[in-house]
Image (spheres, grey):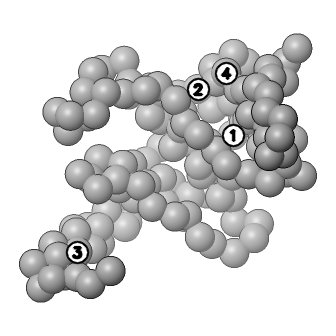
């Protein structure tokens, strides 16, 4: 992919705007268990993730060293967005909110995601389903059943 000068200028502008958000700290979203406390860098990261999700080209990759709380940060973003979705019918005027988050993970760590969601969020706040496929067989299952 080749970027035009206009694309590069827009990217530079977006990155400059993100610097403003770097030191702000979003508090733990309602729906995390009361004993869950994000570290300072996780609250700053959550602020940046929320900001990224509000951009016309939303999304991104949360890449960090192991053990720094990427799973909890991602769950915090999901809970924050869930708290916001009742107030937002359309995103950017064209996309309809799906009220859904898709997490793609290797089968070997799916149980870890389920454990972390249960550990960090209030009971019943997030509903999870597991979609499994091995190329020939596909199934969707409710891990609570």
Mark 1–mark 2 distance (CA, rounded to whole Å): 10 Å
Please tell me how many numbered marks the rendered image carries: 4
The label shown at residue 36 is 1
Mark 1–mark 4 distance (CA, rounded to whole Å): 19 Å
Q: Nearer the viewer, residue 3 or 60?
A: 3
x and y percent of residue 91 in the render? 26, 34
N-terminal label among 1 and 2? 2
What residue sits 69% from the left and 58% below the top? Answer: 69
Q: Which residue is mark 2?
A: 31
N-terminal label among 4 and 3? 3
Q: Nearer the viewer, residue 94 or 11?
A: 94
Mark 3–mark 2 distance (CA, rounded to whole Å): 34 Å
Q: Which residue is mark 3?
A: 11
Q: Is residue 143 above or below residue 80?
A: above
In the drawing, does residue 8 fall left or right of residue 49? left
N-terminal label among 1 and 3? 3
Q: Which residue is mark 4?
A: 127
The crowd level at tag 2 (other Cα within 10 Å; few <14, some 14-19, many 20+) is some
Query: In front of the other: label 1 or label 3?
Result: 3
Q: Quadrant of residue 143?
A: top right
In the drawing, does residue 47 fall left or right of residue 105? left
The crowd level at tag 3 (other Cα within 10 Å; few <14, some 14-19, many 20+) is few
What residue sits 31% from the left and 62% below the top? Answer: 21
Q: Quadrant of the N terminus?
A: bottom left
Mark 1–mark 3 distance (CA, rounded to whole Å): 35 Å
Q: Are marks 3 and 2 in contact (CB under 8 Å)?
A: no
């Amino acid at each position: 992919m080749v970027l035009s000068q206009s694309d590069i200028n827009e990217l530079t502008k977006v990155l400059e705007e993100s610097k403003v958000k770097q030191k702000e700290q979003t508090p733990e979203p309602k729906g995390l268990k009361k004993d869950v406390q994000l570290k300072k860098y996780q609250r700053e990261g959550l602020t940046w993730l929320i900001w990224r999700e509000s951009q016309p080209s939303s999304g991104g990759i949360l890449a960090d060293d192991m053990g720094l709380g990427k799973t909890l940060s991602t769950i915090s973003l999901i809970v924050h967005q869930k708290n916001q979705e009742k107030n937002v019918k359309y995103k950017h005027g064209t996309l309809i909110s799906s009220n859904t988050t898709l997490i793609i993970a290797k089968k070997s760590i799916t149980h870890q995601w389920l454990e972390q969601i249960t550990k960090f969020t209030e009971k019943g706040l997030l509903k999870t389903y597991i979609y499994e496929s091995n190329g020939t067989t596909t199934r969707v299952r409710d891990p609570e059943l």
